[in-house]
Amino acid sequence: MSFCTKCGTEVAADVTFCSKCGNKLQGEQNSPPAQIAEAKLAIWNPTASASWGFLLPFFPMIIHYLNWKKLEKYFELDVRPNKEIRACIGYLLFMFIAAYLFTPREAGVVIFIIFLIWYFKVGKVQIKYVKERFGTKYSKKSLLPPLAIAIGGFLGLIILIGVIQEPENVKIVKKGSMQACPQHTVEKMVDSFMANPKWEHIGASDGKDYVNISGGIGYNTPPARGALQFWVKGKEFGINAFEIDGIPQNITVDGLIQVMCESATEKPAKSKDESYKNHFKDPRDGKKYGTVQIGNQVWMAQNLDYHGSDGFLGLCYGDKPKEKIREPKNCKKYGRLYNWEEAKEACPSGWHLPRDEDWQILVDFAGGDEVAGKKLKAKSGWKEHDFSEKSMDDPKCKWEEIDDRGRSLERNECATDEYGFSALPGGGYGTSFIGAGNFGSWWSSTEDGSGNAYRRGMNYVSSEVFRVNNGKSGLFSVRCLQD
């Protein structure tokens, strides 16, 4: 049997040139391939390199690939190195993907499983080939230099992954959902609730980790900066705190989740205030209010209906708490009634109870005390003001009067709501509830002495806006003015 000294191909004894590589044969072709390999072939031990894969999964794939390239120069191979190339590249790519998609523990398990698949399906092919073809008769290259390079690269990779990979607790919160809004992930809720949210893991305290999220509050006008904090313990998490512009918000967790859930819903249910061009969502309880600009002021276009973080702020018209009688339908229609001390604290962050001077600016813009009420009142909701189709021809806010000379005069007190302020008659409470549907009265923050404060009022039979000064203990409506 004769062999080519260059490529190891079996050749006939009487030929001059190798049919495989063209090498000129000069009588040395009778050397067996193992002897040629022993003299000229230097590769890394495939078995030893594969063993290192249990610590450095990518290392043996690179070593085996380089071995195949070396072997290819000497022998005709049934197994070509392109399989090793694909396995190496695919494995490394999957390692990055697994490190990003899974937690570190999960990624380690997935990577090790893929290594085992490579070892039994690909790695053992080279081990078997070298053992059967050469035994131990080849020059073994030292594994120390590539091991040093691989360990350094692996440590660098860990550092890189630590930089680009999100902490496990951030992933838990992002991919999870809240019980009150199971149809959306927290990430989707936050993305719709905040502009450019930044997620940050701030470490453990009392057995819990915390995830901070900060970003612009999209619905707030003017724009504000929000900060939301989640606690995380194992796979469980929940809302811990919420701030706007650094001010803690007295909001129930359910209220905040409702706001975020509505923000994440592509087609939220239609609400009664959809006729308003601009809106404000109160982050404390999730209620939505129309807003309107009148002159240089921005007002809520609806009476405030916020019951406080404990549920005891203000009353609905007709409520009798001691008798356990509640009238939430009146709050929904007219808003909530507050005493003066409650009214001062009722408006959300970014809004405030208007001063007496603020009310006067509004009234003057609408034509003055005597006519402003007609322009500011809602077109419906007042006593005998029914502008439904059946009564359009005879609205009760229009009538004839006879003066002291016997002349017939037409009176028209029908509201026009020219600016969208939409004042509604929520009535009030002194010693009992009175006046819902007939008059509305709204607190100002301006005091008159220690026991009184100013209000503004409107009623159904007049176009006038009244300035009232009386005790702080009565319950009346609140309209918030933007800061």
Image: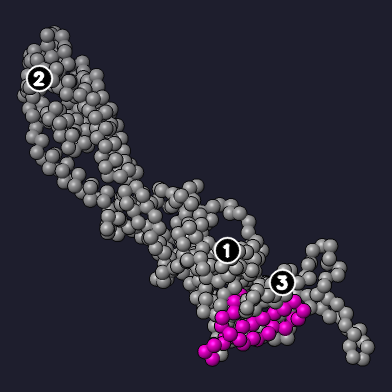
Q: Is residue 365 visible?
A: no
Answer with mark 1 or mark 2, whichever residue precedes in sequence.
2
Could you say where residue 129 lies in the image, as x and y percent from the top left?
Answer: 17, 20
Q: Is residue 33 magenta?
A: no
Mark 2 element type: loop
In the rendered structure, the answer to whether residue 34 lies left or right of residue 350 reads left
Badge 1 vs badge 2, beta-carbon distance below 8 Å? no
Amino acid, disc 1: Lys
Give the residue at x 83% y 76%: 398
Amino acid, disc 3: Gly
In which image quadrant can residue 337 be found? bottom right
Q: Identify residue for label 2.
A: 135
Residue in front for this viewpoint, 127 or 410: 410
Could you say where residue 278 lies in the image, as x and y percent from the top left?
Answer: 60, 67
In the rendered structure, the answer to whether residue 328 lies left or right of residue 155 reads right
For residue 29, above or below residue 200:
above
